[in-house]
Image (spheres, rainbow, N blue to C red):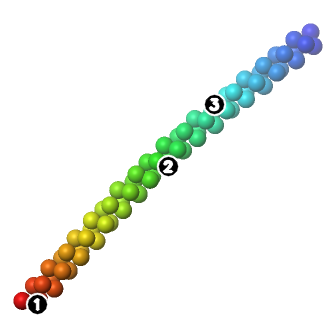
Amino acid sequence: MRNLIFVVAVALLAGCGVDTATTAATGASIKKQEMEEGKRTQERAQQKIDQMQEQMQQRAQQGREASDK
């Protein structure tokens, strides 16, 4: 009888460990996806900033050329 209780207790604890590990793995996977999406968002924002800076430089150059005439 004691052996049966011990086996059941070990099985229950092992089951909890598997559930905890699965939950942790799922959480880690979600965090990884969030980080990747954040990186993509940051890259898109940097591209827009670079484009705007280039446009501003072109307009400034055009303004200088117009004032030289």
Q: Which residue is mark 3?
A: 22
Q: Which residue is mark 2?
A: 35
Q: Position of residue 56 (x, y in %)?
A: 23, 74
Q: Secondary structure at mark 3?
A: helix
Q: Secondary structure at mark 1?
A: helix
Label 3 to label 1: alpha-carbon separation: 69 Å
- Name which residue type carries label 2: Met
Residue located 18% across and 76% down the image: 59
Label 2 to label 3: alpha-carbon separation: 20 Å
Q: Is residue 63 left or right of residue 15?
A: left
* Above or below for 54 versus 42: below
The quarter holding residue 48 reads bottom left
In the depicted view, which residue is nearer to us: 23 or 62? 62
Label 2 to label 1: alpha-carbon separation: 49 Å
Q: Secondary structure at mark 2?
A: helix
Q: Position of residue 37 (x, y in %)?
A: 43, 48
Dots 2 and 1: beta carbons under 8 Å? no
**Residue farthest left in this picture:** 69
Quadrant including the N terminus: top right
Q: Position of residue 10 (x, y in %)?
A: 82, 21
In the depicted view, which residue is nearer to us: 22 or 55? 55
Q: Residues within 10 Å of mark 1 (few under 14, many from 20)?
A: few
The quarter holding residue 19 reads top right
Q: Earlier in the sequence, mark 2 or mark 1?
A: 2
Q: Earlier in the sequence, mark 2 or mark 3?
A: 3
For residue 68, the mark is 1
Residue located 87% across and 15% down the image: 5
Residue located 6% across and 89% down the image: 69
**Residue farthest top in this picture:** 1
